[in-house]
Amino acid sequence: MENRAAHLLLLLVLCYGVTMAVGLYREEKEDWRGDRDETQIDREEEWLLLKDSKRVVKTDAGAMSVLRNYGGRIIDRPMHIGFITMEPRTLFVPQYIDSSLILFIRTGEAKVGLIYEDELAERRLKIGDIYRIPAGSAFYLMNAEEGQRLHIICSIDPSESLGLGFFQSFYIGGGTYPPSILAGFELETLSAAFNVTADEVREIMTRQQEGPIVFIGDSRAPRPSLWTKFLQLKEQDRLQHLKRVVKFQQQPSQGEEQRTWSWRKLLNSIFGQENKKKGEKVGKSPDSYNIYDRRPDFRNNYGWSIALDESDYQPLKYSGIGVYLVNLTAGSMLAPHVNPTATEYGIVLRGSGRIQIVFPNGTQAMDATVKEGDVFWVPRYFPFCQIAARSGPFEFFGFTTSARENRPQFLVGANSILQTLRSPELAAAFGVSEDRINRVIKAQREAVILPSASAAPPDEEEGVTKFERVQKVIKSFGNEVIMGFD
């Protein structure tokens, strides 16, 4: 009896949370509608798909675009989703940004260099690897592979940002395009600080004009770049040149993570260690975590799911972000459920399917068909489900706004909260007999990932399928299920 009371209390808390959330959202949505016509309003039904894409970097060597979530009162924590594409033998030049990143390698292999606790750390990342770059930490990305394009999906956490846009990059290396952060200092100041001549500083500050993503050692580069010229030097010459030219170093900051960096260590990593064996680790930064190497947390005949939290990969703790991956077989469904702890962001990796999200009064917030590359988000507390198309598997990857263990509350299935709440009180809440509500709740023997109606075995009782019987009973409940929300 105590367990039932506890679950009833949990259900009431969830209902209260979604009620407050939808109330705030509808206030906002009324403001958005204004005098717009019905066609414009209909398009708002896909408001939980992120479509505001902006290309923030574009060169011949690669590109980066960002899908922005503007936030709002119903969002516990906004997040942007970034897509980075790099051609073979290219470099995303050294920089630091005002937002933390969680990288996910979609295709290809990358080398990432990161200043961590005043030491240069290098990691080789392969398909499925997760890696965190803290806000304010200097880093670079390189696609050193021949003939293989690199695709990265990343979360962008703007909680520490300056609020100047999606995020703000501070390019360490640069010239006329992109400009280096050093370019704002007077030439005499830099000359004295570097202890070199003004001509040497001027040459370093004006040579680069190929953009933030550049080819390295590749004939497709418009002209030999500063980075290529460094690579063509002998190792000792590169080291001596960099030691002589680059001397700036910040003082260590206090806190749980050191974010200091030095040009000498960062650029020495790029140009002084090219001959290190592939896969060899440098520095003491945390390792990456490969999500494909992990055994699924749940698996049945209809699909599998994986969720990473701070107990699996400690760097997630500092960002407060979780990671998940779901694969559904053709026609299967991730059962209707609620995430009471976090907002979810999902990116379709393969296949197509439907995303259904529901307001607490039983009306649809969104019912959208999604395909590879689409990005959706689900506000905390909102009930939702994902359904794979019958044409093939449906795989999606994503981020959550909590790094703690996620405990979704399933509304349907063998492990649902309705199963736990099965009682005279629940029957009374639906206005039907206890036998009838039990017959509906117990009809589904699978949990978490469910078969489609066509895949479900027929139930010979009264000559109808389980699916048809559930539809009929739910329909008979009528509007009493709406719980009085306006």
Image (cartoon, rainbow, N blue to C red):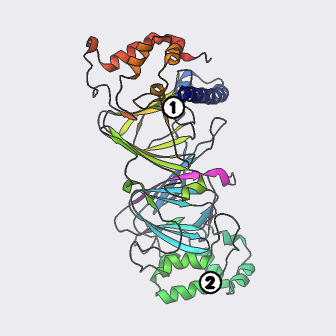
- Res. 46 mark: 1
Q: Which residues are magenta?
A: 143-170
Instruction: Mark 1: give few (<14), some (14-19) or many (20+) Cα within 10 Å.
Output: some
Q: What separation in Å lies between label 1 and label 2 (alpha carbons)?
A: 53 Å
Q: Position of residue 235 (x, y in %)?
A: 47, 86
Q: Position of residue 350 (x, y in %)?
A: 36, 44
Residue at the outermost front position = 1
First of labels 1, 2 by sequence position: 1
Relative depth, front residue between 175 and 85: 85
Where is mark 2, residue-wise?
A: 245
* Residue drawn at x 32%, y 32% as measured from the top left: 331
Is 474 above or below relative to 166? above
Relative depth, front residue between 103 and 408: 408
Is 334 above or below relative to 454? below
Location of the N terminus by quadrant is top right
Q: Position of residue 222 (x, y in %)?
A: 46, 70
- Helix, strand or loop at label 1? It is helix
* Residue drawn at x 58%, y 70% as measured from the top left: 115
What is the three-letter code of the residue carrying label 2? Answer: Val
